[in-house]
Image (cartoon, rainbow, N blue to C red):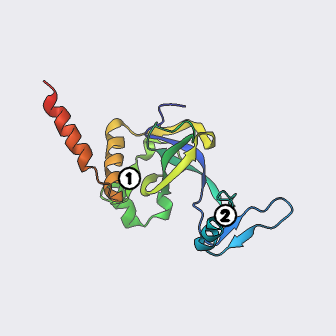
């Protein structure tokens, strides 16, 4: 797969593990429930195995792929979850359509083949393995829209990009 940056695709999306943690204990046993992260970390520090098989819920849902870049060893893409408009208030819907919502980016419904109108959730970052993605796309952001999503994502998460800006300014000064 390539050229996925800015594409909306269907994917199998796991929910982030949270307490109580449910650990897979084999086919003949019920999952082991652990009430907090400290208990698991304490066990690992005492010499236990650091790798577990978690039982987490997941959903088949559309996501917006943020970048084509992925590590071949991990095979994962960064994506944003989508918020369905039916889950938003009327006021939120209006603000999203007007591009005035701080954490949701509108996906124009006529450009995306989805069951309903959606917005990309800037706070809804997920990692999706390449084998969990349906390769056909439901639509694509244009270059400007993807750049806007990237900018808003960086701002929302508070990344410090000052050094990158300084490099870009120096490179621009060198060009004839």
* Residue found at the very far bottom of the displayed protein: 35
Residue depicted at 22% across the width and 38% down the height = 168
Residue 139 in the image, given as x and y percentages of width and height: 47, 39
Q: Is residue 113 visible?
A: no
Q: In this image, 32 relative to 166: left or right? A: right
As drawn, the label of residue 47 is 2
Task: Point out the image quarter for the C terminus.
Answer: top left
Residue depicted at 64% across the width and 65% down the height = 44
When the figure is inspected, residue 126 is found, relative to residue 70, above or below; the finding is below
- Number of numbered discs overlaid on the protein picture: 2
When the figure is inspected, residue 61 is found, relative to residue 19, above or below; the finding is above
Q: In this image, 50 relative to 113: left or right? A: right
Viewer-side residue, 64 vs 22: 22
Q: Nearer the viewer, mark 1 or mark 2?
A: 2
Residue 76 in the image, given as x and y percentages of width and height: 55, 43
Q: In this image, 172 relative to 58: left or right? A: left
Viewer-side residue, 10 vs 25: 25
Residue 49: quadrant of the picture: bottom right
Residue 51 in the image, given as x and y percentages of width and height: 66, 56
When the figure is inspected, residue 59 is found, relative to residue 128, above or below; the finding is below
> Within 10 angstroms of label 1, few (less than 14), some, or many (20 or more) residues?
many
Q: What secondary structure is marked by label 2?
A: loop
Viewer-side residue, 61 vs 151: 151
The residue indicated by pointer 1 is 105
Q: Please tell me which of labels 1 and 2 falls first in the chain.
A: 2
As drawn, the label of residue 9 is none
């Amino acid at each position: 797969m390539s050229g996925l940056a800015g594409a909306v695709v269907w994917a199998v999306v796991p929910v982030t593990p949270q307490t109580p943690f449910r650990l897979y204990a084999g086919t003949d046993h019920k999952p082991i429930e652990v009430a907090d992260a400290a208990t698991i970390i304490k066990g690992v520090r005492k010499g236990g195995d650091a790798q577990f098989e978690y039982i987490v819920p997941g959903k088949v849902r559309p996501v917006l792929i943020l970048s084509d870049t992925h590590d071949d060893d991990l095979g994962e893409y960064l994506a944003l979850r989508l918020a369905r408009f039916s889950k938003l208030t009327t006021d939120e819907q209006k603000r999203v359509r007007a591009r005035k919502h701080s954490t949701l980016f509108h996906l124009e419904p006529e450009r995306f083949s989805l069951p309903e109108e959606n917005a990309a959730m800037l706070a809804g970052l997920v990692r999706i393995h390449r084998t969990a993605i349906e390769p056909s796309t439901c639509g694509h952001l244009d270059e400007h829209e993807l750049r806007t999503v990237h900018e808003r994502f960086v701002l929302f998460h508070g990344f410090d990009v000052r050094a990158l800006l300084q490099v870009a300014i120096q490179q621009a000064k060198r060009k004839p």
